[in-house]
Every structure is written in C-alpha cells, then in structure tokens.
Image (tube, grey):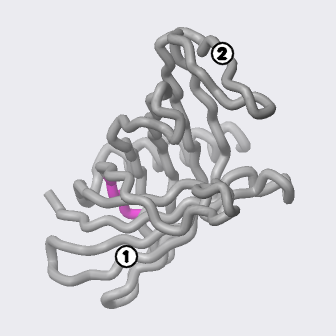
C-alpha cells in the first residue's frame, strides 16, 4: 500500500510540473547582504545598491489556493568592491504563492550562488602604513548558501506585476546571517 501511495504522489507531482500555468520574465535590482558590507572607512554600511538582474518564473497549480513557483535568477556580471574581482550571482528558489486579489504573498526556500572570478594580477594594498604587493588567485570560485525567501507580488494588470522579496542567507548562524532584498517588474509571457 505504501508503494502505491508513493507512486501516486510521484505521478501527481510529475503531472503538475508537466503542465505549467504561466511563465513570467522579470527585470529588477537587488541589494546584497544589507548593512553587512562597509562602504566607507567611517563605518557606513550598504543600504541600497543597483545590481541589475533578470528572473524567469514558472508557475504551476498547487493545492489550497497556492501556486508552486520555480524562480531562476541571474545578476549581471559586475566588478566587486575590489576592482580586480568580477562577481556574478545566480539563484533558484522553490516558492509557494497564495492567491489573494492584488497581493500574492510568496514564501519558500532556495539556493543562492556567488561566483567570484580573478585574473591572477598583482595588487598594491596598504599594509601597516606601507604599500605591499599581493598576488590575487587566478580563476573562479563559487559559494552557495541555503536561503529562506519571503515576499509579495503586487498585480498591476493581468500581464504585469511587481515583486518584492527578502532572502535570508545563513539562517541557522546568528553571526553570519544576512539579508538580500529584491525589487522587480515582471511580465507574463
């Protein structure tokens, strides 16, 4: 009997995923690790940054007035705060969205990837009042974080909506916990 229930569950899930309800494309900006990154020597931290990104969302019917949303996001490559480092972010979120009228709360979990690329050139940095030469590594490295996501869609039109999200990184570690926030304008395809 258990095998029959598992088989039914798998077939129902596969059937739901095969028939998507909607696909949308969004463009927006995000701020990474709000108030964790020092921007000035005096101690001012980041509050708003312009980091453009694109997001593709696949909506599927789910249960109890919810939709299952698969969200795939990609930021534009950009120089890091260290100009010798190129930074690229991408993520995948697995969200549930409740269908109200003009507001649709979303929540779920996902994975946030940060890829840093360096060219192996030398840098001259202040080291105890003197400049010293440091070599940067050559190549790229990718870090991954488990994330929890909460947000809302605000519907303007049948085919246009905005999305506001907060993504919590390192939820289990109170010292390393950080928050990213996202704002996008999305178009149903």
Q: Is residue 70 rendered to the left or right of residue 173?
A: left
Q: Is residue 128 rendered to the left or right of residue 180?
A: right
The residue under the point 42% across, 72% down is: 164
Q: CA distance from mark 1 to mark 2?
A: 46 Å
Where is residue 56? Give x, y as percent: 30, 49
Would you name the residue on which mark 2 appears?
Answer: 134
The residue under the point 58% across, 56% down is: 39
The one of 27 and 10 positioned closer to us in this rendering: 27
Q: Decide whether the magenta segment is chiefly helix, strand or loop.
A: strand
Would you name the residue on which mark 1 appears?
Answer: 153
Residue 138 image-quadrant placement: top right
Name above or below for residue 141 compared with residue 143. above
Where is residue 103? Give x, y as percent: 38, 85
The residue under the point 29% across, 52% down is: 20
Name above or below for residue 147 compared with residue 141. below
Q: Is residue 147 rendered to the left or right of residue 176?
A: left
Residue at far front of view: 130
Where is residue 149? Give x, y as percent: 57, 62
Sequence order check: which comes first, mark 1 or mark 2? 2
The one of 164 and 125 positioned closer to us in this rendering: 125
The residue under the point 50% across, 73% down is: 151
Residue segment shown in magenta: 57-62
Where is residue 37? Give x, y as percent: 64, 54
Name above or below for residue 188 compared with residue 1. below
The answer to whether residue 5 of the structure is visible from this angle is: yes
């Amino acid at each position: 009997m258990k095998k029959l229930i598992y088989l039914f569950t798998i077939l129902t899930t596969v059937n739901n995923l095969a028939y998507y309800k909607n696909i949308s494309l969004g463009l927006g900006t995000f701020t990474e690790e709000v108030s964790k990154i020092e921007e000035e020597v005096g101690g001012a931290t980041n509050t708003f940054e312009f980091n453009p990104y694109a997001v593709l969302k696949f909506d599927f019917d789910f249960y109890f007035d919810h939709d299952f949303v698969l969200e795939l996001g990609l930021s534009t490559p950009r120089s890091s705060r260290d100009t010798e480092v190129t930074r690229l972010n991408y993520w995948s979120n697995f969200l549930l969205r409740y269908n109200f009228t003009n507001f649709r709360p979303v929540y779920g979990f996902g994975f946030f990837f940060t890829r840093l690329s360096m060219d192996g050139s030398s840098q001259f940095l202040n080291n105890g009042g003197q400049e010293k030469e440091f070599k940067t590594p050559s190549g790229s490295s990718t870090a991954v974080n488990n994330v929890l996501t909460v947000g809302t869609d605000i519907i303007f039109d049948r085919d246009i909506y905005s999305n506001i999200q907060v993504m919590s990184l390192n939820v289990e570690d109170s010292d390393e916990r950080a928050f990213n926030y996202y704002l996008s304008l999305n178009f149903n395809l």
